[in-house]
Image (cartoon, helix red, strand yellow):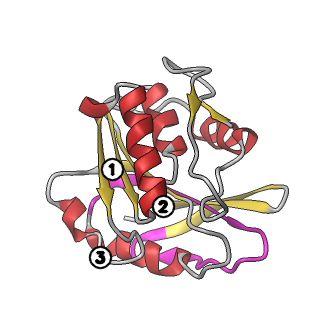
Amino acid sequence: MVRIIAGELRGRRLRTPPGRSTRPTADRTREAVFDILGDLPRGAWVLDLFAGSGAFGIEALSRGAAGAVFVENDRRAFAVLRGNLQALDLGRRSRAFFRDAARGLGFLARGFRFRIAFLDPPYRAGLVPPALQALAAAGCMDPAGLLVVEHAADEEVPESAGPFRRSDLRRYGDTLVSFYSSML
């Protein structure tokens, strides 16, 4: 069971997709990531790619993000995500898209500017490099934006993608979280 750790929705539980196709981020890892991020900038929009249940984006909304966009391409996960957004009454502050996050994300540049993007693709599927490239090419990130990428400890991820360079790396058991900052 996944729960919201802090903010206005603290303690609320999220449904997760059945089966093994989606791997929810451990509460401890998510809490550590948000401790590193600190307070979200006023008016910040966040992007949750490979959203699954929407835990990263919903946590950001709970902690004060102005809005969140969720991108997911697994039908069962997308249905659960939409249900979580509805159950928490987050419809006005969120948008959910049924799309492949490792492909073109140019549609996001037509109306969104994100301060933080969370990428949590299936481990060892080779999706981190194409997703980072698609995100860099989309032009939807704020120049001061930050990318937070969760991946397996034994998975190779690039040092850079477009204007983004890896600026920090943290380990949580078998999980690594890479932080990318814009070099612009």
The image quarter in which residue 101 lies: bottom left
Disc 2 vs disc 1: which is toward the camera?
2
Confirm or deny contact between disc 2 and disc 1 (CB under 8 A): no
In front here: 75 or 62?
A: 75
Three-letter amino acid code at the position of disc 1: Phe
Three-letter amino acid code at the position of disc 2: Phe
Q: What range of the chain is rendered magenta?
A: 140-164
Is 167 drawn above or below residue 161 in the view shown? above
Helix, strand or loop status at disc 2 = loop
The residue positioned 67% from the left and 62% from the top of the image is: 20
Is 30 drawn above or below residue 86 in the view shown? below
- Where is residue 109 shown, x and y percent of the image? 20, 61
Quickly name the residue at label 3. Answer: 104
Q: Is residue 163 left or right of residue 149?
A: left
Q: Quadrant of the C terminus?
A: bottom left
Three-letter amino acid code at the position of disc 3: Gly
Disc 3 vs disc 1: which is toward the camera?
3
Q: Is residue 29 left or right of residue 126?
A: right
**Marks 2/1: CA distance?**
16 Å
Disc 2 vs disc 3: which is toward the camera?
2
The residue positioned 78% from the left and 69% from the top of the image is: 153
Query: Is residue 146 visible in this depiction of the protein?
Result: no
Q: Residue furthest top?
A: 8
Main SS of the magenta part reads: strand
Say which label, 3 or 1, has the lower sequence index: 3
**Marks 3/1: CA distance?**
16 Å
Quickly name the residue at label 2. Answer: 50
The image quarter in which residue 131 lies: bottom left
**Marks 2/3: CA distance?**
14 Å
- Where is residue 42 shown, x and y percent of the image? 35, 28
Quickly name the residue at label 1. Answer: 114
